DNA sequence: TCCCTGCATCGATGGATATCGATCCAACGA
DNA sequence: TCGTTGGATCGATATCCATCGATGCAGGGA
């Protein structure tokens, strides 16, 4: 089961890293029609933040210096350890977080470009 | 049942309209801890955009001149009429849309301040 | 007064998901 | 090699929710 791959969302002008034909993803919501595929991709990201527990986990990580934190430092959100793990996985699959193991501990970090992309979608300019 | 009241989300510097002690709602997600109540409020808004159909409906409305549209102009999103109505209600309850009847038709409009607030939450600045 | 049209609401249903305890696996230390 | 600790995965369950057809209701003709 390889459904752990994060949502496709390049859009960082990093370079030539396997730049498939994924559209620059997610134009501002005012840009007329929205393809079914784009809507699906964007919905995954918004849905990831559409849960109070995930919001608090994400907030704790974002508030940590460097936008990264050890799981052991953010586990106190009122639910069991398996549930925390489940929510962190959801956030990672949505592309909002990345994870890395360092020895005994696992660190989760905010993916700034993806979050910025979400903010850009909500930029209605003047409207 | 009066559970149709939109989410509490003043934060617009409009004036003195019954300004209860609702905190200015929803600081940037990097601002340390997030209270359970705030997380709940914010989650409702993100969850509202966490569905492809709702995202397309919202997009269509936002793309219309003036950020408002008649239901009859946006119904073509691939689901039944009751389902469209259900999703529009969800978006309205989340505070992202307002609705107004004009004769035979009902118009939905984007609530710019609320959308801007969501964008502000995602502003991680430098981090 | 009917009838038609535009939306909202109701009730049912199937699928998604948040949550948990139990268990497994990786890293580390004794 | 064993035991301990951090974290992920599994399997079960209860709740939520997206969707539909049927129905109700308001506005506007005829």
Image: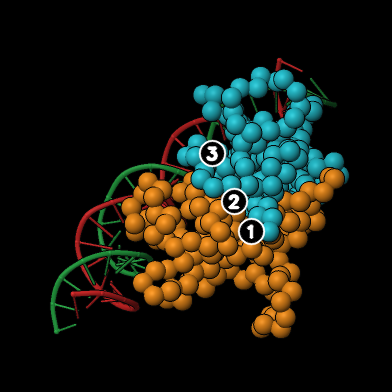
Chain colours: A orange, B cyan, C red, D green
Q: Residues within 10 Å of mark 3 (few under 14, many from 20)?
A: some
Q: Look at the image and tell me in which quarter the C terminus of chain B lies.
A: bottom right
Looking at the image, which residue is at 66% across and 83% down?
A: A18
Q: Give me the chain letter of mark 1.
A: B
Q: Give whichever of A42, B11 is nearer the camera.
A: B11
Pointer 1 residue: B127
Q: In the figure, residue D23 lies in which quadrant?
A: top right
Q: From mark 1 to mark 3, how far is it between C-alphas?
A: 21 Å
Give yes or no for contact between labels 2 and 1 (Cβ–Cβ under 8 Å).
yes
In the image, taking residue B93 as reference, residue D3 lies left or right, namely left
Q: Earlier in the sequence, mark 2 or mark 3?
A: 2
Q: Give me the chain letter of mark 2.
A: B
In the image, taking residue A78 as reference, residue A66 lies left or right, namely right
Depth-wise, is mark 1 or mark 3 nearer the camera? 1
Pointer 2 residue: B30
Helix, strand, or loop for circle 2?
loop
Q: From mark 2 to mark 1, how far is it between C-alphas?
A: 8 Å
Q: Is residue B48 visible?
A: no
Pointer 3 residue: B38
Q: Earlier in the sequence, mark 2 or mark 1?
A: 2
Q: Are marks 2 and 3 on the same chain?
A: yes
Give yes or no for contact between labels 2 and 3 (Cβ–Cβ under 8 Å).
no
């Amino acid at each position: 089961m390889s459904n752990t791959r994060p949502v496709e969302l390049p859009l960082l002008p990093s370079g030539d890293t396997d730049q498939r034909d994924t559209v620059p993803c997610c134009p501002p919501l005012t840009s007329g029609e929205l393809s079914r595929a784009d809507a699906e991709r964007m919905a995954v990201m918004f849905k990831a933040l559409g849960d109070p527990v995930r919001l608090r986990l994400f907030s704790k990580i974002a508030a940590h210096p460097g936008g990264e934190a050890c799981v052991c430092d953010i586990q106190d959100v009122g639910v069991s350890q398996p549930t925390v793990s489940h929510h962190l996985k959801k956030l990672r699959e949505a592309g909002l977080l990345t994870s890395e193991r360092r020895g005994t501990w696992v660190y989760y970090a905010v993916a700034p470009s993806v979050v910025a992309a979400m903010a850009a979608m909500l930029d209605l300019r003047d409207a």
